[in-house]
Amino acid sequence: MATSVDNRHYPRLSSALNGGVVHSFKPPLVPSPSLDRDQDQSVNVPTEKSVDKTTKEDRYDSSDDEDESHNRYVSYYKEMVLKSNSDLEPSALDSRDESTADNWIHRNSSMVRLTGKHPFNAEAPLPRLMHHGFITPVPLHYVRNHGGVPKAEWSDWSVEVTGLVKRPVKLTMEQLITEFPSREFPVTLVCAGNRRKEQNMVKQTIGFNWGSAGVSTSLWRGVALSDVLRRCGVYSKRGGALNVCFEGAEDLPGGGGSKYGTSIKKEMAMDPARDIILAYMQNGELLTPDHGFPVRVIIPGFIGGRMVKWLKRIIVTPQESDNYYHYKDNRVLPSYVDAELANEECKFKFYLFTLLLQEVDHGGNNNNVCCVAAWWYRPEYIINELNINSVITTPGHEEILPINAFTTQKPYTLKGYAYSGN
Ligand SMILES: Nc1nc2c(c(=O)[nH]1)N[C@H]1C(S)=C(S)[C@@H](COP(=O)(O)O)O[C@H]1N2
Ligand SMILES: [Mo]
């Protein structure tokens, strides 16, 4: 059973909550996968009053010129979403998901599954990704799931903001969409594993084989993380508030059982210019289950791994996240350190730590215990900002181009994509 809803029923959600950017956004005219989803839950549409308030706040410092350029920007991307959604077959339940926890999710059957059936880690066939252009239709957007997709309900979801904040809260989805101004803009998501198949051919890593389609761009709408944090009154640096941790909803096996979680530096999280949002819409529709319904983090320019889906908790802390996936995922160790060595040294560190505790227990001093490299925990090997990357997609890999009297008379168009983080 699907648990998301069709946005067409909630016109105000799409048109009135505009942030400084988009002033009206109608859902695509062509069938999109979310239009097939069972409508078994309802979104509390914001009241006229709350909508008015939000809209005024948003516009309060924008000039006519800005409004005009926003309008142009809006119709430009609206067009792109419409265009990219044409030639799209409807998503459907997939027999490959039948015996898995994801058997209620509608998916596009052309998605290439990279880790067997489950969890769902998938990318579009590269020519398909390119065919749809700059904006990727949601069903063809790559998916990286560490486990089963949480069955979420819009009406009983909340995001807790806690830790080093003066006013901890639990925000419902209703509160998020009515009490904060929204923003909407295109963001490219890239899994840090994009193109890892090629990397694995050079030297095997512990990561699975991504092709070159672990990258997708869509229009994301949400509320600014900095607004939410400011509302809660984050402590000062001197008060110990240095990091902002995010935690998802799934129960995962990592580290003997944990949620998916990670963190970013507080000054980044609080910087409005970074455009970090808690997103609840993608390409003009509420999020789909695979992409984090009902709400996820979007951090422009960062690897996808920092953008926690099914967001449940935001915790302001002195230390960075202690989540298993924050340390064991999304790191690049020096080429001479393979996972085996990294894990060996981890055990060694643990052993030393045990010794040290024993020494302390026996009243010994620990000055002679050397600090052993714990590769996974070293800050210099974390990946946050996206590296520069480019791919030629036409001609395709191993495609042979005939060179003859006929072909040499015509121009040939090379195609590809490129991105970088900051
Ligand atoms: N809760 C949760 N958030 C998550 C993940 C996950 O497994 N669980 N995967 C992360 C990784 S590694 C990536 S690349 C992105 C992928 O987002 P997408 O599936 O919407 O493309 O989500 C990130 N956020
Ligand atoms: Mo990722």
Image (spheres, rainbow, N blue to C red):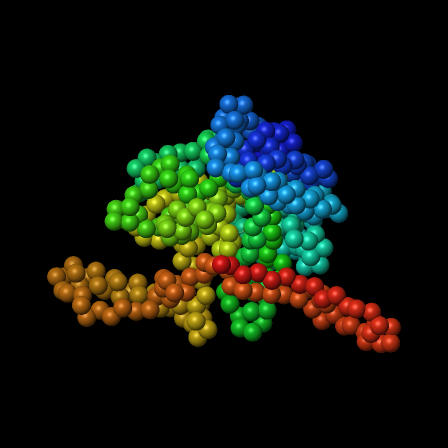
Residue 29 shows in this picture: yes
Q: What is the x, y in percent for residue 249?
A: 46, 42
* Residue depicted at 70% across the width and 63% down the height: 415
Residue 173 shows in this picture: no
Instruction: Pick whichever, 412 or 38, lies toward us.
Output: 412
Instruction: Pick whichever, 260 or 343, lies toward us.
Output: 260
Q: What is the x, y in percent for residue 12?
A: 59, 29
Quarter of the image for residue 73 reads top right
* Residue depicted at 18% across the width and 68% down the height: 367
Task: Work out which residue is located at the far left of the displayed protein and give it.
Answer: 363
* Residue depicted at 40% across the width and 58% down the height: 327
Instruction: Pick whichever, 273 or 399, lies toward us.
Output: 273
**Left or right side of 195 for 326:** left
**Left or right side of 318 for 69:** right
**Quadrant (top left/top right/bottom left/bottom right) for the N terminus:** top right
Q: What is the x, y in percent for residue 218?
A: 60, 48
